[in-house]
């Protein structure tokens, strides 16, 4: 597979806007480990090899265990994630697959007890951002280094 174009060079203003969103997310107060799990799960669903590779590496640097990284795809079937992480992963899946799920009320009821309104909004912005990055990387065939 070959890269199609360098979207960083093709749309510098768009990348600055994405980076500003990332900066706001980084200052949101959400746990870094949670953010990496969310980024990884969305990237797995979207089939973004570049982002999966990057977020596994970032999670490892942040102290994430190999066992949890290996089981993010099957988080429902493992005891390795907290209730808060499970709620975030379920929210991530519903939003990433929004055309199929329309984010059911049951998922809302799962996430609501574990996050404040501000945290839910910030978690949602995180999911919006990673889905945007995934769509850029997949569309233009950005490859892991």
Image (cartoon, helix red, strand yellow):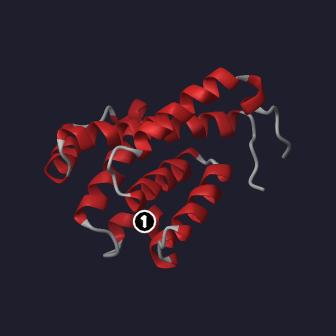
Q: How many marks?
A: 1
48 versus 69 height, above or below = above
The residue that label 1 is drawn on is 74
Relative to residue 34, is residue 107 drawn left or right?
left
User: Splitting the image into 4 quarters, where does residue 60 fall?
Assistant: bottom right
User: Splitting the image into 4 quarters, where does residue 5 fall?
Assistant: top right
Task: Tell me the crowding category of disc 1: few under 14, some 14 to 19, or many 20 or more residues within 10 angstroms, Cα based.
Answer: few
Residue occupying image coordinates x 33% and y 39%: 122
46 versus 66 height, above or below = above
Residue occupying image coordinates x 86% and y 43%: 2
Q: Residue 76: image x %, image y %?
A: 33, 64
Residue occupying image coordinates x 42% and y 53%: 35
Q: Residue 63: image x %, image y %?
A: 48, 73
Secondary structure type for disc 1: helix
Quarter holding the C terminus is bottom right
133 versus 93 height, above or below = above
Residue occupying image coordinates x 69% and y 33%: 139
Relative to residue 141, is residue 91 drawn left or right?
left
Residue 20 appears in view: yes
Residue 96 appears in view: no
Q: Residue 55: image x %, image y %?
A: 57, 57
68 versus 51 height, above or below = below
Q: Residue 113: image x %, image y %?
A: 13, 51
């Amino acid at each position: 597979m070959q890269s199609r174009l360098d979207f960083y060079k093709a749309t510098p203003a768009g990348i600055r806007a994405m980076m500003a969103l990332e900066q706001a997310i980084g200052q949101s107060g959400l746990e870094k480990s949670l953010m990496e799990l969310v980024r990884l799960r969305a990237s797995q669903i979207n089939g973004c090899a570049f982002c999966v590779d990057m977020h596994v590496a970032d999670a490892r640097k942040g102290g994430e265990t190999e066992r949890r990284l290996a089981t993010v795809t099957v988080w429902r079937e493992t005891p390795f994630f907290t209730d808060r992480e499970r709620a975030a992963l379920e929210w991530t899946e519903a939003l990433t697959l929004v055309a199929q799920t329309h984010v059911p009320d049951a998922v809302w009821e799962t996430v609501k007890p574990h996050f404040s309104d501000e945290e839910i909004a910030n978690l949602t912005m995180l999911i919006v951002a990673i889905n945007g990055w995934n769509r850029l990387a997949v569309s233009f065939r950005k490859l892991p280094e």
